[in-house]
Image (tube, rainbow, N blue to C red):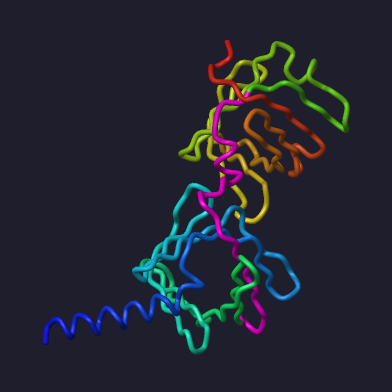
Amino acid sequence: MFCKIQLILLITLFSYMTSAQPVIGFWEIKEVKVGDKLMTPVARWTRINKDGTYQSGNGWHQNSEGTWQFNAEASTFFPSETNGIKEPFGAFHVSVNGKNMIWQRMEGGMNVKVTLAPINKLPKSTADQIVGLWDLTDALQEKQSIKAQFDPENKYYIFIRWDRVYVKRTSKGEQETGYWYINAHQPEVTFINENEKETHQRWRISVNNSELTLYGISESNKNTKLLFQRVNEFPE
């Protein structure tokens, strides 16, 4: 009798997991469309496990976990975050387009469409890429180099730490510290100086493994462009 019950439970579990197979896997969210607007987060991913749990995050940072339910008959997926806010909009309708998975539902009267693609490793976000030590190589204003005036003694560098603290040596050789945060939907960073008299500065980012470019987009740095190279020792 006990073995029979176990067998029934295993068959039921197998049947459920087979029907839920379209959603199980490791996915990157490639596009989020809310109405006619694109609202795609940077490097957003979710790992949907066979045991009914999931983890999600941005880049190398996991920021949520929970459980999920899949209704095979209705083809709907419902995630429930363990320590988050109760889901107010209900389940997503799930469809498959080639290798991609599509989630759709109504949120506040607007159609939301999420496109997910299978991945094998965590995507790297802008926040992950800019962490490190960067030495200034050039400074431009209105496309003209102002490096000779901006940093005549080649002192300027910025150390962007993983703990959201930055340390900057100015062109005068003075050290400044503060905090940085990244825009979740755009490659933009804001530096908040610990000195309350200094204004916050926002920059648009272009970055790869060896080079970082900051484009000023706040009033205090507009039309300024700073170019850096990655280094592994603090400049003298």
Q: Position of residue 199 (x, y in %)?
A: 65, 39
Count of marks overlaid on the render: 0
- Is residue 148 shown left or right of residue 48? right
| Residue for point 79% across, 34% down | 224
Q: Position of residue 142 (x, y in %)?
A: 88, 33
From the viewer's perspective, is residue 233 above or below residue 204?
Answer: above
- Which residue appears farthest toward the left when viewing the image? 1
Q: Quadrant of the C terminus?
A: top right
From the viewer's perspective, is residue 197 above or below residue 227?
Answer: below
From the viewer's perspective, is residue 205 above or below residue 24?
Answer: above
Q: Quadrant of the N terminus?
A: bottom left
Q: Magenta segment range?
A: 106-134
| Residue for point 64% across, 28% down | 210
| Residue for point 72% across, 76% down | 35
Q: Position of residue 228 (x, y in %)?
A: 68, 26
- Name the one closer to the observer, 220 or 214: 214
Q: Position of residue 93 (x, y in %)?
A: 57, 81
Residue 140 occupies quadrant: top right
Residue 139 occupies quadrant: top right
- Name the one closer to the observer, 165 or 233: 233
- Is residue 159 shown left or right of residue 149? left
Does the stretch in magenta take in 118?
yes
From the viewer's perspective, is residue 189 above or below residue 234?
Answer: below
| Residue for point 58% across, 53% down | 43
Does the stretch in magenta take in 236?
no
